[in-house]
Structures are given as structure tokens and as C-alpha cells.
């Protein structure tokens, strides 16, 4: 018996040596049936979801091209329609290059257990994120019966780098809860935005942010979640494109410039340095790390030969056309005619939803503490070489000397 064991061990060693030069790799994989997850019940009020796991999958010595299937069911035993997420309750996957993938088809069963059509399938995707599918709707009394397929993709090339890698996981469900900007953690918000789900946060929803002992607690607002085609146009400002947060109040007061000049526009201002250093560094580190560079286009002053300015910013002030929706088209007001970059940006979703125009502007008002106050915009007016635009305390526009100290209320994008 001892001799047989020695021979068997030698054979395995030889097999490993022989396979190291081949274009496929052997390793073990398993999905646990998980007795604790066999009948998971998710309840909230009159909503009730029951998840029934299928048989455990245990596979050894698989190679590229291997696949297996697994059936699980989700039943809504509650009295109301609801939504759920398909998740990994636990997951370990060290297989690289996204070569292990998962997909699923779904049958819809009525209250009697009879198949009466299909439900939302899950397209093939690498096994990586803990959430497999999100916000799947299910009516009361209905069962979703999934057939999951797990595939080790064959690349027709050497895949030995995946020898000795590990995969195991436990499938499950959780009740879907709509993202809430006010209560979600920054890590959850950032993850949702990075996953392309930023639009699930309501435009106009707010959240407190602590800027430390110097500036205190202020309010951030979801100002934009959309990216229209014009945002992809060369030379178009990105400041009102994508997931944009703006301060809904005034952080502090600061001069646009130390002297009475708008020469050099926004890129040359002491304000730009201030918001991209002092204010940026006061934000929570987790939030700072998710702020993306933004191509910022801004208007110039009256200096001969000047062109519009383009800068790359973490934080930036808004432009007039991002606030007043008719800034580009209104001919009865003199302000827009002196904004040379008015056609190179768009109005933020928030101000569009508020119906903000040059004659309807209460939605522009921001407070410094308890009182409405002026706040700076980034565009220089071409009417002279000393002024920038501001939002007046009542919500209308004005242009004013750059050396005056007024409200600071910047914006930034996450991604």
C-alpha cells in the first residue's frame, strides 16, 4: 500500500511537470450549496423574498473551456411587487484576465409554479463584483428560476498564469434599496458613480460634508447626472457633464483676484488656486480621491486678442450658462453678450429642473450662514478688464470688480 501511494504521488508530480508547458491550466473550483443560504428570507413590511439555492457545485481539475450550470430560484411570497439584487454572499476569485465569467437565463413561474415566459437574463460578465445584477423587479406570487452558467474562457493562447488560482463563491439575493445621497456613505456613492449608476441619485438631493475646523460643515448637492452628446464635442466644457456635485451653500468669502483685473481669466485667478488647494484639501480624503480632472472652458475679459480659456481643474466655479438656462438665447438682457464662452457649456440638470432663467431665478439663491449672499462665477466679462460675473443675493446676475471678496461655492465631478 505504501508503494502504491508513492507511485501515485510520483505520477501527480510528473503530470504537473508535463502540464506546465501546455496552453491550459488545471485548478479547483467550487460553489457551495451553503446550508445557511438555502432558504434565505428577506422581509420588509409586506415584502417577502425567498431564495432557494440549488445543489452545490464542486469541480476539480478544470481547464479552459470548462463550464457548469447551477439553478436557483427567487420567489416573492409577499403581497407587494418589489425589486432585488443577485449577489455573491461570499466570493474568492484569484483567476486573472477576467477569464472566469458568469451568465444566466431566467424563467418566470406563476403562483401555481407553471412557466409562463421569461424574466430578465444576466449577460455574460467577469466574476469580480459582489453584485451580479441589480434592481430586478418581481411581482407578488411570482418565481424567477435562474440557470447560471459559469465558464472558464479559452483564449487559444498560453493560460498557465492561472495555474494554482482559486475560485469559490456562494450565490444569494438581497432586497434592492434605492440609492440615497443623504444617507449613503461616500464609498457607496463613489462605487455607484464608478459603476455607471450615478443617475439613480436624484438631482437636487443633498448631503452634509465636513470641511474641518477651518470651514466647518456644508451642504453638497447633486447638480447633474447626464452626459448629452454635446459633452463629447471637442472644445466643450465638461463642467456640466456627468456626475456633478456643487455646494448648495457658501463656504467662505474670497477675492477673485488680489487686484482689480480679469486679465488671464479664470486660470490666472487667485480664486482658482484657493479652491483647488485650500477647499480641495479640506474635503474628506475618500471624496478627494474620487474627484476627476475636469476640462473647464471660461470666457475672457476685454484685453485685445484674448481667446477663451481652457484649464484642467479638480474644483471649479460655475459659469453663467450653467445656471441660467436662457443665458445663451436671451437677447433682452445685456449680460450674456459679454460672456464669450456662453456657447461652450450647458445648463446643469439641477437648474434646468428648477426652471431657472434670467427672469425666474429664485433657485439660484445660496446662503452664507443664514443670509442670502453673492457668489462668484468663473467667467470674466468682456465688457471691461476688471470684472467677473457673480450670482446676486436675490438670484439675478451681476458683474463686479475682481478684487472684492464674495461667496465661494464651487463644484466638482466624481468618476
Image: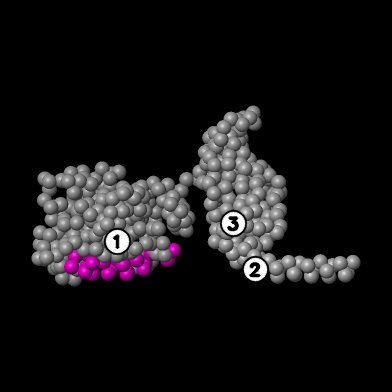
Residue at the image point whose x is 16% and y is 63% from the top? 307
Reading the image, the residue beneath label 3 is 154
User: What segment is highlighted magenta in the picture?
Assistant: 264-286
- Viewer-proximal residue among 229 and 154: 154
* Label ID, residue 144: none
Label 1: which residue?
Answer: 295
For label 3, the SS is loop
Label 1 to label 3, Cα distance in Å? 41 Å
Q: Are marks 1 and 2 in contact (CB under 8 Å)?
A: no
Residue nearest the viewer, comparing 244 with 98: 98
Q: CA distance from mark 3 to mark 2?
A: 16 Å
**Residue 242 seen in render:** yes
Residue 342, position in %: x, y? 19, 53
Which mark, by number, is residue 21? 2
Against 13, residue 153 (above or below) is above
Which residue sits at x=63%, y=40%?
73
Expressed as whole percent of the image width and height from the top left, the position of residue 60 reads 71, 57
Which residue is pictured at 59% across the width and 55% down the height? Answer: 153
Instruction: Check disc 2 and report its element: helix, strand or loop.
Output: loop
| Number of residues whose C-alpha sits closer than 10 Å to that of mark 1, classed few (under 14), some (14–19) or many (20 or more) | some
Magenta segment includes 161: no
Dot 3 and dot 2 residues touching (CB under 8 Å): no
Residue situated in front as seen by the camera: 267 or 275: 267
Q: Residue at x 74, y 69 (%)?
A: 14
Q: Report, in whole angstroms, how far the alpha carbon at label 1 lies from the one at label 2.
A: 49 Å
Q: Earlier in the sequence, mark 1 or mark 2?
A: 2
User: In which quarter of the view is residue 267 placed?
Assistant: bottom left
Number of on-image labels: 3
Amino acid at each position: 500500500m505504501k508503494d502504491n501511494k508513492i507511485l501515485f504521488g510520483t505520477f501527480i508530480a510528473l503530470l504537473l511537470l508535463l502540464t506546465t508547458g501546455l496552453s491550459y491550466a488545471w485548478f479547483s473550483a467550487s460553489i457551495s450549496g451553503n446550508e445557511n443560504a438555502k432558504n434565505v428570507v428577506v422581509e420588509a413590511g409586506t415584502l417577502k423574498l425567498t431564495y432557494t439555492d440549488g445543489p452545490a457545485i464542486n469541480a476539480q481539475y478544470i481547464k479552459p473551456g470548462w463550464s457548469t450550470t447551477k439553478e436557483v430560484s427567487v420567489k416573492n411570497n409577499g403581497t407587494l411587487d418589489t425589486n432585488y439584487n443577485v449577489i455573491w454572499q461570499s466570493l474568492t476569485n484569484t483567476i486573472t484576465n477576467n477569464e472566469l465569467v458568469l451568465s444566466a437565463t431566467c424563467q418566470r413561474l406563476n403562483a401555481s409554479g407553471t412557466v409562463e415566459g421569461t424574466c430578465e437574463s444576466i449577460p455574460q460578465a467577469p466574476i469580480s463584483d459582489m453584485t451580479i445584477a441589480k434592481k430586478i423587479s418581481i411581482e407578488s406570487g411570482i418565481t424567477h428560476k435562474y440557470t447560471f452558467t459559469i465558464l472558464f474562457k479559452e483564449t487559444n493562447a498560453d493560460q498557465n498564469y492561472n495555474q494554482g488560482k482559486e475560485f469559490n463563491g456562494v450565490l444569494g439575493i438581497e432586497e434592492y434599496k434605492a440609492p440615497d445621497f443623504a444617507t449613503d456613505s461616500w464609498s457607496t456613492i463613489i462605487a455607484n458613480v464608478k459603476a455607471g449608476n450615478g443617475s439613480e441619485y436624484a438631482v437636487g438631493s443633498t448631503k452634509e460634508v465636513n470641511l474641518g475646523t477651518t470651514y466647518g460643515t456644508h451642504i453638497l448637492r447633486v447638480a447633474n447626472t447626464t452626459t448629452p452628446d454635446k459633452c463629447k464635442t471637442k472644445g466643450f466644457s465638461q463642467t456640466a457633464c456627468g456626475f456633478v456635485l456643487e455646494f448648495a451653500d457658501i463656504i467662505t468669502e474670497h477675492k477673485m483676484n488680489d487686484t482689480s483685473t480679469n486679465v488671464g481669466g479664470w486660470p490666472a485667478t487667485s480664486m482658482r488656486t484657493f479652491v483647488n488647494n485650500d477647499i480641495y484639501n479640506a474635503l474628506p480624503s475618500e471624496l478627494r480621491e474620487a474627484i476627476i480632472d475636469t476640462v473647464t472652458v471660461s470666457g475672457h475679459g476685454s484685453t485685445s486678442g484674448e481667446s477663451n480659456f481652457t484649464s484642467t481643474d479638480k474644483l471649479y466655479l460655475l459659469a453663467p450658462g450653467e445656471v441660467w438656462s436662457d443665458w445663451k438665447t436671451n437677447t433682452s438682457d445685456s449680460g450674456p453678450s459679454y460672456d464669450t464662452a456662453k456657447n461652450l457649456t450647458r445648463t446643469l440638470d439641477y437648474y434646468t429642473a428648477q426652471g431657472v432663467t434670467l427672469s425666474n431665478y429664485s433657485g439660484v439663491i445660496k446662503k452664507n450662514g443664514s443670509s442670502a449672499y453673492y457668489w462668484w462665477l468663473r467667467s470674466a466679462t468682456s465688457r471691461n478688464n476688471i470684472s467677473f460675473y457673480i450670482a446676486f443675493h436675490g438670484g439675478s446676475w451681476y458683474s463686479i470688480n475682481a478684487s472684492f471678496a464674495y461667496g465661494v461655492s464651487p463644484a466638482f465631478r466624481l468618476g
